[in-house]
Amino acid sequence: MNNTRADKLRNYTVIARLDDAIPLNTEEWVAVEQLLNQISEFVPLSMLNNLTESIVSYADDQARRGYLLGQEDLVAELKKKSARIA
């Protein structure tokens, strides 16, 4: 159970770091938002909300995974440098 708490805390810390570092209003997101607004004329709002939540969830997960991979790469690089120094 402690691992689950630690994992949740670690994920929360990563998400908070990403939220602070990544701008939300990018050209790419504005384009997606415009398309979603156009689609909203033809699609039920509940379906559009579900789609938007899925896109956001997917993007958050990809950003989190990328951040963690970057941290792993950084640790590996620091270990290599410290081994060369020692």
Image (spheres, rainbow, N blue to C red):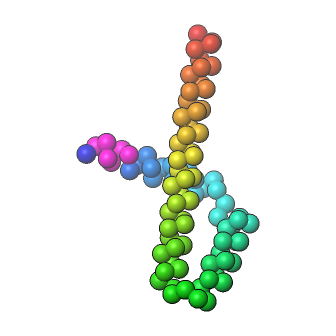
Is 4 within the magenta? yes
Looking at this view, name the residue that lies furthest to the top.
86
Choose between 44 and 20: the one closer to the eye.
44
Residue 80 place in picture, x, y as percent: 59, 20
State the quadrant of the C terminus.
top right
State the quadrant of the N terminus.
top left
Total numbered labels placed on residues in the image: 0
**Residue 16 makes an appearance in the image:** no
Residue 15 place in picture, x, y as percent: 51, 54
Task: Name which residue lies at 51% across and 55% down.
Answer: 61
Segment colored magenta: 2-7
Vertical side of 35 occupied by 84: above or below:
above
Vertical side of 12 occupied by 44: above or below:
below
Residue 64 place in picture, x, y as percent: 53, 50
Residue 81 place in picture, x, y as percent: 62, 19
Vertical side of 58 occupied by 34: above or below:
below
Q: Tell me if 68 is positioned left or right of 85 in this view.
A: left
Task: Name which residue lies at 43% across and 46% down.
Answer: 10
Task: Name which residue lies at 58% across and 88% down.
Answer: 42
**Residue 26 makes an appearance in the image:** yes
Main SS, magenta residues: helix
Looking at this view, name the residue that lies furthest to the left.
1
Is 36 within the magenta? no
